[in-house]
Image (cartoon, rainbow, N blue to C red):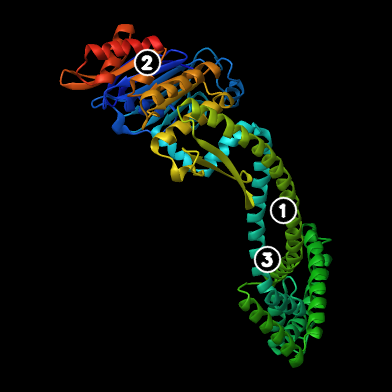
Amino acid sequence: MLRHLTINNYVLIESLDIDLQPGFSVLTGETGAGKSIILGALGLLMGQKADTQSIMSGAAKCTVEGLFDIEGYDMQELFDENGLDYEPSECILRREVTANGKSRAFVNDSPVAVSVLRQLAFRLLDIHSQHSNLLLENPAFQLGIVDTIAGHTELLSQYQECYSRIVEARRKLKEMEENLAKQQNDEDYLRYQLEQLEEFKPQAGEDEELRQVQSALSHAEDIKIALTGVDALLNGSDDESGVGAIDALRRSCQTIQQIAKVFPAIDSYSERLESVVIEVRDIAGDINSLSEDVEYNPARLQQVTERLDALYVLEQKHHVDSSEELIALAEDIRAQLNSLTSSEDNIQALRQQIAADTEQAKKLAEKLSAGRSKAARQVEKQVAETLVAMDMPATQFCANITKADELQPSGQDIVTFFFSANKSVAPRPLADVASGGEMSRVMLALKAMTSKQTHLPTIIFDEIDTGVSGKMASSMAQIMAAMSKGAGQQVLAITHLPQIAAKGNAHYFVYKEDQEGRTLTHIRKLDDEQRITELAHLLSGSKVTEAAMENARQLLKEK
């Protein structure tokens, strides 16, 4: 229940600070006095978009704060989920909007995201304006009414979870099928590429190795001559001395050994020369072997050149730079081809999942349909009874349920409210035949019926009495008063009709005053005498007559 409302610097409201009563209350005031401004401020508290133009001229920020009593409304879990302190007797929601466009929200003085404020506010407050009657033209709203009376929230949640899985699986299936089709279109080309690579069989490091072999074969004669020359220098040849480097080193070593007996300082060089002789002899042997291996082989050179050219062509074709990258490409193509089989298996598994979920969803939809069929009869009965109480005895109202061809987000049922104000006229869709006043009464009947199930602490009716007057208005007021008692709700009706205004347990009056060159909106609670005067104004207009005053007194007595 909204116990206290504070508004500062919002449009024409400089400061509004008022206690609100439980039960059924009414709010009246001249057109343009600021009733819609108060509703706009409450809209901010409910998380609606902030607008800097709503800030009073010259003010740095505007603030809207509501103090709620939420005892007995099972909201602790919602507070715990958002890490908020739970104070059932005093829950404070506050919204601030600064002149620079920044908006801040608070719950019990803790800063929260606007989405959290909205989530809490929608559990505390429902504002029903005359524009809300347009909801009656919405099939989803009509289905929601029947679901509310059916009370199968958990069953509906199970269905919606199952339906969401189906929608997501279908989206994924479409994506997988499109990818598979694209891959299958490329399959022949991929297989051709793989066959070509597998036939060529590139080896890691092959390109560099082939380049070295090609270079050696191309210069075989030069290499042979050079190696032969080196061998001659090391081992001796047909030159004038006939002495090779190895023989010269060996003789040098012998000479040093001979003088080492009389010159010990040179003895270490003898050992070093012996090591050099051994090393040079090994080198000479290796060079001799290499020389024997080198031969001019035009056939082998052609073979290596052709292999290397083919490797270059393959690398250029696939935009790679080495044989290692060709090997990696072959592995990648092989993986893509293997994934085709895997994708087909995954698609088949996903289709089976969709089929199973669809079967489950259909069973849940059937259960929903059974509950809705029963609830629809209850809706018809209660709405008809309420409309009769609002002086519409000839009304025909029915909740028609048809089946959709496919599963829908809330099942397979389509609910359409049919209406006729006369017994002699067959009912037709409510949105097609009901007048504005009839829409208002039907909506009030629906709200009265669902108020216990929705368990909302506070509901505000903004001129729901549009298009009605007299006895019918009085009946509507009685229904709103009954809602506040039977459902334990705080009900506030904004009205221009004295028949409704007289029925409130509390009466609030909105008015404007010019102060120091500014027009400001105020609100005050009326006492009994002030109520009589205000009701008389509503009855007779600006000129209050004694007859209007007496009529006002009578209306209050009837309450």
Q: Is residue 245 left or right of residue 147?
A: right
Report which residue position mark 3 lands on. Answer: 180
Mark 1 or mark 2, earlier in chain: 1
For mark 3, give the secondary structure.
helix
Where residue 213 appears, as percent x and y from the top left, is 72, 81
Q: Is residue 240 visible?
A: no
Q: Earlier in the sequence, mark 3 or mark 2?
A: 3
What whole-number distance in Å separates the C-alpha atoms at marks 3 and 1? 18 Å
In the depicted structure, whether residue 219 falls above or below residue 554: below
Residue picked out by circle 1: 354
Q: Are marks 3 and 1 in contact (CB under 8 Å)?
A: no
As drawn, 271 above or below 87: below
Q: Is residue 86 left or right of residue 54?
A: right
Residue 249 seen in this snapshot: yes
Q: Secondary structure at mark 1?
A: helix
Mark 3 residue crowding within 10 angstroms, few (<14) / some (14–19) / many (20+): some
Inspect the image, locate mark 1, and give the three-letter code of the amino acid beneath it. Ile
Residue ID at (72%, 79%): 196
**Split into 4 quadrants, where in the image is the C terminus?**
top left
Query: In this view of the protein, which residue sits in the foreground, 426 or 88?
Result: 426
In the rendered image, which residue does mark 2 sit on? 502
Residue 74 placement: quadrant: top right
- Marks 3/2: CA–CA distance: 72 Å
Which is more foreground, mark 1 or mark 2?
2
- The amino acid sitting under disc 2 is Ala
Q: Nearer the viewer, mark 3 or mark 1?
A: 1
Callout 3 amino acid:
Leu
For mark 2, give the secondary structure.
loop
Q: Residue at x 36, y 32 (%)?
A: 467
